[in-house]
Image (tube, rainbow, N blue to C red):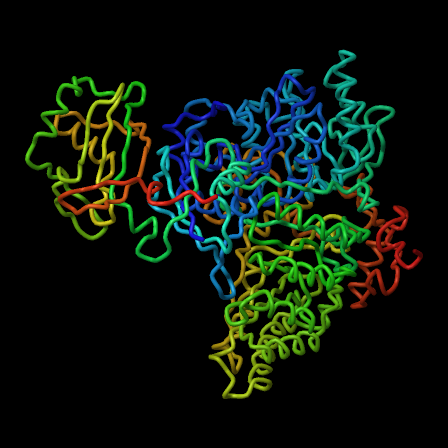
Amino acid sequence: MKVRIKFAKTGHMKFVGHLDTMRYFQKAVRRAGLPIAFSGGYSPHMIMSFAAPLGVGTTSLGEYFDMELTETVPTKEIENRLNAVMVDGVSVCSARQVEDGKASTAMSLVAAADYSVQFREGKEPAADWRSRLDAFLSQKEIIVTKKTKRSEKTVDIRPYIYEMHLDGEGVFMQLASASSNYTKPELVMDTFLQWMGEEPLPFAYMIERREVYANKGTEEDRRLVTLEALGDEVE
Amino acid sequence: MRKLALRDEILLQIDKAARYIGGEVNAIMKNKDDVDIRFAMAFPDVYEIGMSNLGMMILYDMFNKRDDVWCERLFSPWTDLDKIMREEKIPLFTLESQDPVKEFDFLGITLGYEMCYTNVLQLLDLGGIPLRAVQRTEDDPLVIGGGACAYNPEPLAEFFDLFYIGEGETVYDALFDAYKANKKNGGSRQDFLLKAAQIPGIYVPSLYEVTYKEDGTIESFCPKYEGVPQKVEKQLVIDMDKDYNKLEAPVVPHIKATQDRVTLEIQRGCIRGCRFCQAGMIYRPTRERDVETLKESARIMLQNTGHEEISLSSLSSSDYSDLKEIVNFLIDEFREEAVNISLPSLRIDAFALDVMSKVQDVKKSSLTFAPEAGSQRLRNVINKGLTEEDILHGAGEAFKGGWNQVKLYFMLGLPTETEDDMKGIAHLAQKIAETYYEVVPKEQRKGKVQINVSTSFFVPKPFTPFQWAPMFREGDFIEKAKVVKNEIRSQLNQRSIRYNWHEPDVTVLEGFLARGDRRCSEVILRAYEKGALYDAWSESFDYDIWKEAFRETGVDIEFYTLRERSTDEILPWDFIDAGVTKKFLIREWEQAKAETVTPNCRQKCSGCGVLKYKGGVCCESKN
């Protein structure tokens, strides 16, 4: 049985990085006593794959991983058993059975993600950034320079900003998140501020990932579905 | 949600912020208003190292079983955070409540190795606690030390209010009760210390006075007040079923600790009596835990932590009577759940090879032998009962079983060592290489045999038969390593032998701290003030700082390291009754010089003195 887990990582757990979060769940699955499947060989590892890595410092209400169980367990029971062994700051939102197969791993499905960004106290730009957001987005293209270890390249990130609008004190954005067009919310915010002539301050943003989506449509005509919605509850 | 002591901006700019946030699986939260005693338990090294310490975890669990105590953890802030805390005057805090350590009743510091001593001062300093015990007031926590280095607490005597000598399970309850009673009666800090000093195993350095002879050796070591005992008796658990604190739910770190696994302590002590080994002396007598209890503990701890590995812990696992039973149990019970089984300190024999071939990939793993000395003569001196025949036979069997990597550990600078003993290291490595080509037919060989030889430099430790032995200067140590290196290079199979040796600077300093007295405190303090920190880490160890500290304080390091002490000298740690008698240690020192082997505890009682505890191996045959 292939199961997709959706979990939230909030509070202090944002300081626990991606690899350590994977280790955390490997141990949690054992504590929960779930019949996890292992690979063969001398050092067997759990058949488990995480969707999109989350940077240190970012909280999330929509994280995902898939795992393989050797027998069918009701999805509500999986959720409850995992929640019984969580620490403060990590909670399992749902468990869903998903179809088998390499093409449908959580990681390969990721197409977009929602974020909420707020300014940390005292780090908000002096300029009235709220009134400038529409003008920023109405640009035909938004060229940024991406530095990699070997080279610099320029990319137009406008097509990757699927959605961006004011939301309470901060900003909501939906960004492209596939491996080919993965766009960081920090990059979008920095670019926006620089476009206004403001220098972004270090650690200025508090970012929360809200949801992660697969694309069931085409590149041009997107039909975004949450990774959770691709699975089914099992009783 | 708990409020963290550090702001987000700080946590986001330092390495491994998860070291400082607490909130791990099985961490214990209480309400501080519901307890009488707040105990901050510190390990003076970075989180990943400290969280791998079994002793600390046992005490954390044990203290928190008391409703009136909340024990919390803290570790040395890494240098990046250290800098920020000083700049911003952020006081050192515990992981659980994130409260400043200065607010606690006790600050307990585990002393596992000498090279952490400057980190001890860092903890006090960042905690806002006066470094010297005499400067502390009624508002400061009581600073208590424990662990292996507490067997010679004197170099740290200035900085601690009290020390606990021995295993923590026995008198901490009495200490806490005395603290509560004193608080209730409105007693002062000094009142409590006087009471504490009367509890067996508790040493309050400020209640003793030391005088020195003109030659620098100790003239007298006496209690200052009536009722303060002349001798402090080490504490140990006699009944390993009733009085041993069984861990059930160790804390699971958020980040990968050095020991990222369940540690199952199968016994304490060692029957072997290697003359260089402090642990083998101070943890006498050898006490085994019941195998059925161990099985249950293994299951419970794996269940409660979710760890994917379990490791047996003891000084010499092969001497545990029910080793086969516990190992086979672990394999049968947990292999299916893909739990790795790690078996350190196993003597290489048929059983060990069979087990290892089941639990690890033979092709990728290497076998470890610790002959410690290169010649049989010197192995007799140190009472290491491993013969060349044992090693060659074990290696041969291993090669037949498919292994082709061997690790060999030796010490240089052992008492009576000659050039032949050093060269013997190279010759033994060569013989092992030859064994490979003899026992493995050409068509079955998978590449070359690989022999990794490592040498460390010997450090004499208190309460060992070598506690009187001289050490060497750094340059002499390097010469010894060169002898080994050159001899290895002239062996036929030298291409199969790799050699590396430890830096001698740290060794010499460790030797100074291990057998130091109260006057050494000044050097440690000066070195710390000049920036020494994380001396156990080669990347941060700076010997030049220490050299300056010696120069400025006028303390002569060679008085402590190079001198062969006479057996009638009063040693700084003589006031501790560690079980083994001085008479026994002197006898063993003489036996060593006579190159005579002493049988192990199961073969024949050597009358070391620990029979008085009436437990463990001393009483085995009588049961």
- Image check: A20 left or right of A186? right
Q: Residue at x 49, y 49 (%)?
A: B538
Return the residue nearer the eye: B33 or B580. Answer: B33
Q: Quadrant of residue A112?
A: top left
Tell me where residue B472 sits by quadrant.
bottom right
Picture coordinates of residue B310 (x, y %)?
A: 61, 53
Residue drawn at x 85%, y 58% is B587
Instruction: Compare residues B521 and A20 and report the one nearer the observer.
Output: A20
Residue occupying the point 42% across, 52% down: A2
| Horizontal and vertical percent position of residue B189 | 72, 18
State whether residue B189 is above or below residue A203: above
Residue at the far left: name it. A140
In this rendering, position of residue B341 left or right of residue A119: right
Please state the horizontal and vertical placement of residue B139, each as a whole percent of the image: 64, 16
Outermost residue toward the front in this view? A235
The residue lying furthest to the right in this view is B622
Is any atom of residue B542 visible in this view? Answer: no
- Is A159 on the left-hand or right-hand side of B605? left
Question: Is B398 or A30 nearer to us in this picture?
Answer: A30
Q: Residue furthest bottom?
A: B442
Whether residue B241 is visible here, answered yes or no, is yes
Residue A175: image quadrant is top left
Residue A159 location in percent, x, y? 13, 40
